[in-house]
Amino acid sequence: MHKILFTDLGNVVLFFDRRRVASGLHALIPAKSIDDIDQIINKSAKGIALLEQFEVGEIASEHYREEIEKLLGAEIPAEDFWRAHTDLFTPNIAVLDLWKKLRAGGEVEKIIAVTDTDPVRLKAGLAMVESCGLTLDGAVASCAVGHRKPHPAMFSAALAAASVPASQCIFVDDNPAYTDAAAGMGIHAVCYRAREADAHELLFSELRHLGLSA
């Protein structure tokens, strides 16, 4: 029996688009184009490094904001900055509804997020999931663990939160390197290829293969 469903947040239950963050910041810094802001915060070596540090808890939220402001050459009110920073999610209703169905039908006992993210986006993402009618039973986030997937520490933390053997858990993620890592620790893993046309059908098929009535 599978008691626990571990689910990624980004590109599984929530789609995300970091360019939307650049668009939001552009409204506050019109002198810079959306493309320029996107390059600076999302694609430059420094911008990527800062986000990675934020996502593993190496830097605090205000330090991250201040460093991004330096890169952009502009001061941004904190409330406006964080509003833009978290405005990247849209719900994946098909998967959200499926997770609700699996738990309501007793196919899984608990659903726990296992996600690489910073504490600010984690709060926003969980709030959006909740607003769509899915209350998660916990969240294991890189910002608390101190490592990102596919580091074994993430899956060890997830199993500790689940308090059941790996063989009773399923992990769904959109990154095959992450599902491979979970499988290497004995967790049943399914790669959800979110951007493919038949992504939902493939997900349902994989879950049925594991014995769930998806």
Image (tube, grey):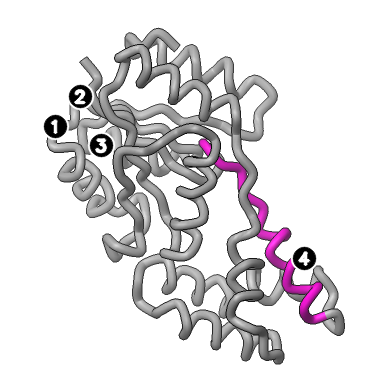
Circle 2/circle 1 CB separation < 8 Å:
yes
User: At numbered mark 1, what does the secondary structure look like: helix, strand or loop?
Assistant: loop
Q: Image check: 116 left or right of 66?
A: left
User: Residue 105: where, in percent of width, then height?
Assistant: 36, 12
- Single out the mark in the foreground, 3 or 4: 4
Q: Looking at the image, is 160 positioned above or below residue 83?
A: above
User: Residue 114: where, in percent of width, then height?
Assistant: 36, 45
Say which amino acid is labelled 2.
Gln
Q: Which of these two is toward me, 180 or 149? A: 149
Circle 3/circle 1 CB separation < 8 Å:
no
3D distance between C-alphas at marks 3 and 2:
14 Å
Give the mark nearer the N terminus: 3 vs 1: 1
User: At numbered mark 3, what does the secondary structure look like: helix, strand or loop?
Assistant: helix
Give the mark nearer the N terminus: 3 vs 2: 2
- Single out the mark in the foreground, 3 or 1: 1
Say which amino acid is labelled 3.
Gly
Q: Image check: 58 left or right of 94?
A: left
Magenta-drawn segment:
12-29
Residue denoted by label 3:
184
Say which amino acid is labelled 1.
Val
3D distance between C-alphas at marks 1 and 4:
43 Å
3D distance between C-alphas at marks 3 and 4:
39 Å
Within 10 Å of disc 2 (Cα), the crowding (few <14, some 14-19, many 20+) is some
User: Residue 192: where, in percent of width, then height?
Assistant: 51, 30
- For the point 52% across and 23% down, the residue is 97
User: At numbered mark 2, what does the secondary structure look like: helix, strand or loop?
Assistant: helix
Give the mark nearer the N terminus: 2 vs 4: 4
Q: Quadrant of the N terminus?
A: top left
